[in-house]
């Protein structure tokens, strides 16, 4: 196992890009905001050093409107695999605003997705707001148990269990 991975961002997994596009379209006419996570390229079967963006994290409590998205910083996970951010511009402009640039300090890549949220309606930028190339990679993402891997039956069972505990024994 390697202790240090290359910090070079090689690209974004097709599935992660499609999630960002769909989330942006679902949020329209409001902005969408999320954070990007990456995995070591070799763990995804690529014969290159570097990182591939594999996930878009949705942050609870994000407040959005048609011109901005505000994330509660207390909700942002302290994640070693964090590589940047993604957000939408409902007006379709694929260029960072001065407000965007103020949030680009953390992370190596920041993606802006614009209306109408089709496959070509996005651009990647570095932390200074300069455009950067970002390949879309067709990689198989690892299947694994996720924090959000539960069903309605799991929720119902948990609620029933807690209800039984709270019941008055008399």
Image: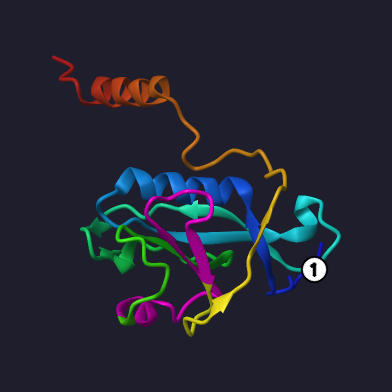
* Residue at left offset 73%, top offset 70%: 5
Q: Which residue is mark 1?
A: 49
* Residue at left offset 36%, top offset 26%: 155
* Residue at left offset 32%, top offset 66%: 74
Q: Nearer the viewer, residue 150 or 50?
A: 50
Compared to 164, does 45 lie above or below? below
Describe residue 133's horizontal placement relative to residue 139 as left or right: left
Q: Position of residue 10 (x, y in %)?
A: 70, 66
Describe residue 166's horizontal placement relative to residue 23 as left or right: left
Q: Nearer the viewer, residue 128 or 38?
A: 128
Residue 60 visible in the picture: yes
The magenta region covers 99-124
* Residue at left offset 37%, top offset 46%: 25
Check the picture and name the quadrant holding the C terminus. top left
Name the secondary structure under disc 1.
loop
Q: Quadrant of residue 135?
A: bottom right
Q: Position of residue 36 (x, y in %)?
A: 51, 61
Q: Within 10 angstroms of label 1, few (less than 14), some, or many (20 or more) residues? A: some
Is 106 a magenta residue? yes
Q: Quadrant of residue 169?
A: top left
Q: Position of residue 50 (x, y in %)?
A: 74, 68
Q: Nearer the viewer, residue 27 or 80?
A: 27
Is 170 a magenta residue? no
Compared to 33, does 24 lie above or below? above
């Amino acid at each position: 196992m390697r202790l240090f991975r290359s910090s070079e961002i090689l690209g974004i997994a097709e599935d992660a890009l499609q999630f960002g596009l769909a989330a942006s379209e679902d949020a329209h006419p409001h902005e969408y905001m999320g954070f990007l996570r990456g995995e070591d390229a070799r763990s995804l079967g690529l014969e290159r050093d570097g990182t591939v963006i594999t996930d878009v994290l949705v942050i609870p409590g994000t407040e959005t409107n048609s011109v901005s998205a505000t994330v509660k910083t207390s909700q942002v996970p302290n994640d070693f695999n964090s590589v940047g951010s993604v957000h939408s511009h409902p007006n379709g402009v694929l260029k960072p605003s001065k407000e965007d640039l103020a949030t680009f300090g953390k992370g190596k890549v920041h993606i802006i997705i614009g209306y109408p949220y089709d496959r070509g309606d996005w651009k990647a930028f570095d932390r200074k707001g300069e455009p950067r190339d970002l390949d879309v990679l067709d990689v198989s993402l690892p299947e694994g148990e996720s924090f959000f891997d539960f069903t309605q039956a799991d929720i119902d069972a948990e609620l029933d269990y807690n209800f039984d505990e709270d019941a008055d024994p008399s």
